[in-house]
Structures are given as C-alpha cells and as structure tokens.
Amino acid sequence: MMKFFARLSLFCALFLLLFPSIQAQDRRSSRKPAEQRTTEFGSSLEQYGKRPKRKPVKQGRSEQPSSDETIRVETDLVVVDFLVSNDKGNIIKGLTKNDFVVSEDGKEQTVELFANGSSDDIPRSIVLILDNSGGQAPYANESIAAAKLLIEKLGDQDRLAIVTGDRKLRIGFTGDKAALYRALDSIDWGWVWNAEYDSLLAVLNELFEETSGQRIVVFQGDGTHAMWMKRDKEHPYPVSYSTLMNNGMRYTGISSISKYGFADVREAIERSRATIYPVIVGWRVLGLSRKVQNENTIASMRTFSRFYGLRDESDMPPVIRKLGHSKLEASLSGQKTMFRVAELSGGLADFIETPDDAKAVYSNIFTVMENRYVIGYHPSNQVKDGKRREIRISVKNRPDLIVTARTHYFFE
C-alpha cells in the first residue's frame, strides 16, 4: 500500500513537471500583495495576442536610498554591464575605461560612466525567479539555502525582489534581508503549475520601471514551460506535436499554448535592459550525444523517483517510463531556450543537476556579478524613436578577449 501511494505521488509530481501551465481565470483571491502596486503583478501579460502598442520600460530614477557618492543614472543614459574573459573562460580583471570601445549602430560612443560590478556607486536591482512547481520540489531546500547566500552578499545599495514560477510576486524590491529570508521560507513547493516564462515576462515588463543602475534577473527553473509558447520563427527549439500531446494538450486543447511567442520574450529582454542568469534545474542534455542524453534523462527521473520514495526508475509506473522521450524533448527545448535568454541579455546559464550543486551555482553567479564591468553612455543619436539599436563592446587591441554583453536595446 505504501508503495502504491509513493507511485501515485511520483506520478502526480512528474505529471505536474511535464504538464502545461494553466492560466487561472482570477488569481487575486489567493494572492497576498507583496508590495503596494497600482496594478496586479502579471497584468502586462494581457497585452499579448491583442497587439496593442507596447508599454516601454522606463530607465527611471531609482527609489533606492540616496547617497552623495551614488552615481545618478539619468533617463537617457544607456547602462550596460558585461563580462570579459579569455578563450579558456578565465575572467579578466583590472581593465579601465580607456581599454574599451563602445559603438551603437556602428558609431563609436563616448563612455561617461565606468565602474566594476562590485561598486557600491552603481546599485543593483536583482529579481530572483524560482520555479516552485512539482518537478522542482527535490531541489527546494538546497535552492532556498543557496538563494539565502546570495541575499547575504547583497551590498548596502542593492535591492532584491522574489517572484515564483506560479506568477506571484512574493516580495518587492527591498534591502531588508530578514524580510527576504522570510519570503523564501514561505514559498509553497509542489502543487502549483509551472508558468515560469509568464513570471519572467511579468518581471521584465513591470518590475524595472522605477529602477536604475544594474538590472539583474536570476531565473531558476527547468525551462520546459518554453515548449508551450506560441510558435514563431524565433523559438529556439519547438517540440513535436506528439510531445505536446503526451504532456497534456490532449486534455486541455490548444488553450494550453501561451498568447506570446519567443519573439515577445526577446523584445521584453531588450526593452528591460536586464541581464539574466538562467539557473537550469535538471541534468544537462543540450549539446550531448544521444546516448548521454538518454542516460541523463533517466538520471533526472531517478532524482524525482527517489525524492518521492521509490528506489529507481524500475519502480516507476509504466505510464511514467513511457514519458522518457517526451521528457527528453521537453528538456532540450527548455535548456536551449534558457541559453538563448542568457545570450540575448548578456548573462550566463548554469546547471543544478543534483540538489547539492545549488550553492556552487549561486556562488558562481555572485562572483560573475562582482567581476563584470559597467559602462554608461549618452547615445549620440538622441532621437527617442523607440527603435531597436545595436550595441557592440570590444577591448582595444585585444581581439583574443571575449566580451559577454547584451547586443541590442530600445531607446525610448
């Protein structure tokens, strides 16, 4: 009897892991406001599918505490944070303002702001997004502990907000570490739907409107919600119809598909000017041989089976074992999309394959943040036409060095 209930729990957990997110008709009754807002968090998602004029994300004045030494970021100052490394992946430190060339749409720009990512003069507004759906439960404790280490390292001028994958704003931007710890501890894991890209879009569209300085998103999840995006030419990895059917579309129909596509995600990334660090939960399958992909898919399923009380995959109900191929394709879609998000924003992606990896991954993210450079410039083209512009940053006379940065933004 105990094994029956264990199998039932595993079935439910994996079903939630693979099943599409369901858009609730009304979330207000179950959500407690994390901060005073004039609109409901996530309301910007209503624009998709209706084709209205996009609401720009303003590079406004920060509401963070003032300081005589804090650099004031004006609305028309374009701020870009970026990493410099060599071909071995080693971070290059100690460069100065005069080492860089910045161009916009092919025209060299005058650098007016320069600092290290660790500078207290340029505050960081960080949003932590945690997918808290059933498939993430085995990683919950270690992920929370790792996130607390990130909070512990926040500087005096830094502010952090927490959002979960069920499209809930748990706490708005604050430097109150005790309040942030409480918000993390209060997250419910397991019996919620995975809507991680809903949460990411809501964050990019809404939370950075009144912030300045560095805008950062730490985006933890498996990325598989990406397969439920509307198909468009920019989707990094559309899955097959059979995988959609096996993952629940046979029960929900076409309504499972989001109103937005990846082109909308790209535009939100570029308009927000945020740097995104995807933290991919689950064993890596992207870029590996088919044999290793299959082995790692089984390893991921074994992580869940052991968490829910089963010895190994042989104890899984047959219906779960048959989901292996669909899970592999869903994982490929999720992981490739997460890497594309990192690339577009100038961030870096990493994997939490086993729960014990979490602390090292979060520690590495903080190290990368601290060792990035920050450049700001007033565009020579001051016409706020709302058009997409291209940014290029290079190190003078050092073609061997790699600059990881966003490549496009909108001047609005």
Image: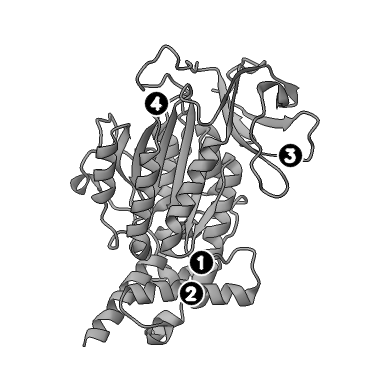
- Rounded to the nearest angstrom, the CA distance separating label 1 from label 3 is 30 Å
Q: Seen from this angle, which residue lies furthest left? A: 29
The residue wearing badge 2 is: 299
Q: Amino acid at mark 1?
A: Trp
The x, y position of residue 332, in whole percent, is 56, 64
* Of the pair 294 and 389, the residue shown nearer to us: 294
- The answer to whether 246 appears left or right of 76 in the picture is left
* Of the pair 16 and 366, the residue shown nearer to us: 366
Q: Earlier in the sequence, mark 4 or mark 2?
A: 4
Element at badge 2? helix
* Of the pair 45 and 151, the residue shown nearer to us: 151
Q: Could you tell me which residue is drawn at 52 percent across and 76 percent down?
A: 325
Residue 49 visible at all: no
- Rounded to the nearest angstrom, the CA distance separating label 1 from label 4 is 36 Å
The x, y position of residue 191, in whole percent, is 27, 62
Q: How many residues crowd mark 1 within 10 Å: few (<14), some (14–19), many (20+)?
A: many
The residue wearing badge 3 is: 401
- Rounded to the nearest angstrom, the CA distance separating label 3 from label 4 is 31 Å
Q: Earlier in the sequence, mark 1 or mark 4?
A: 4
Q: Which quadrant of the view contains residue 67?
A: top left
The residue wearing badge 4 is: 157
- The answer to whether 402 appears left or right of 187 in the picture is right
Q: Where 386 falls versus 300 (above or below)?
A: above
